[in-house]
Amino acid sequence: MDSGSLTYISFASQNAQWVRVTQTGTTTWNWWSIHEFDVFAPSGTPRFTGSSSSPWSGTDGAFDGVASTRWDSNGFQTPGQWIEVDMRSTKTFSKVVLDSSGSPGDFPQGYTVQISNDRITWNQVASGAGVSVTTNGVSTIPVGQRTARYIRVTQTGTSSTAYRSIHEFRVTP
């Protein structure tokens, strides 16, 4: 729907990595331009974003719902590598799930999980060895019943043969 200089297009919820808009009309007096392009998730849908210690590997692949994409450490596992997740609002959860099944050897050799509501004060809620919580490349880390907006998972173990990869990041009740 055109609303002056803003155009809003609504459609049923989709799970996709890319959005394409194709110009189908014609005019002899106006150029077609887009100054901003925003895509909004349906109300109530978690929209996670992340940052990490690896500036070479964007975090989007861990939150896009596509198993073939991923975030990775861009190097072998060393202590201090981290990924931080902004869940956009506070969520209640009891498990953090790191799905590395597309790269099954890339589960965390060791980890800590911290949570925060303000990105200033962090509380550690779990730590351990990835092998003890990983099955077929999926690490399910119990954290107890928690409510937080931010989650940070930090690598504490070492591997000279495996990167640290997350194909999909989830929290579960």
Image (cartoon, rainbow, N blue to C red):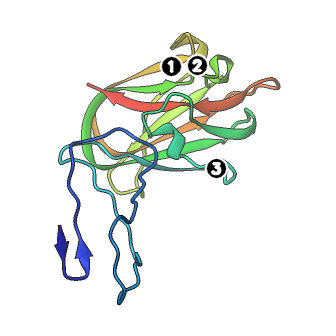
Query: Which residue is drawn at the image coordinates 60% and 13% (left, top)?
Result: 131
Amino acid type at mark 1: Ser
Few, some or many residues within 10 Å of mark 1 (<14, 14–19, 20+): many
Q: CA distance from mark 3 to mark 1?
A: 20 Å
Amino acid type at mark 2: Gly
- Choose the circle earlier in sequence order: 2 or 3: 3
Give the image location of residue 142, x and y in percent. 39, 21
Query: Which residue is drawn at the image coordinates 50% and 24% (left, top)?
Result: 99
**Left or right: residue 94 compared with residue 86:** left
- Choose the circle earlier in sequence order: 3 or 1: 3
Q: How many marks?
A: 3
Q: Quadrant of residue 14?
A: top left
Give the image location of residue 8, x and y in percent. 22, 65
Residue 53 has which mark? 3
Depth check, front residue: 38 or 119: 38
Give the image location of residue 162, x and y in percent. 75, 25
Give the image location of residue 141, x and y in percent. 44, 22
Few, some or many residues within 10 Å of mark 3 (<14, 14–19, 20+): some
Residue 50 has which mark? none
Q: CA distance from mark 1 to mark 2?
A: 7 Å
Q: CA distance from mark 2 to mark 3?
A: 19 Å
> Mark 2 and mark 1 in contact (Cβ < 8 Å)?
yes
Q: Is any atom of residue 145 visible in this view?
A: no
Circle 3 SS class: loop
The residue that mark 2 highlights is 130
Depth check, front residue: 113 or 168: 168
- Choose the circle earlier in sequence order: 1 or 2: 2
Above or below: residue 161 compared with residue 32:
above
Query: Which residue is drawn at the image coordinates 57% and 16% (left, top)?
Result: 137
> Mark 3 and mark 2 in contact (Cβ < 8 Å)?
no
Above or below: residue 158 compared with residue 129:
below
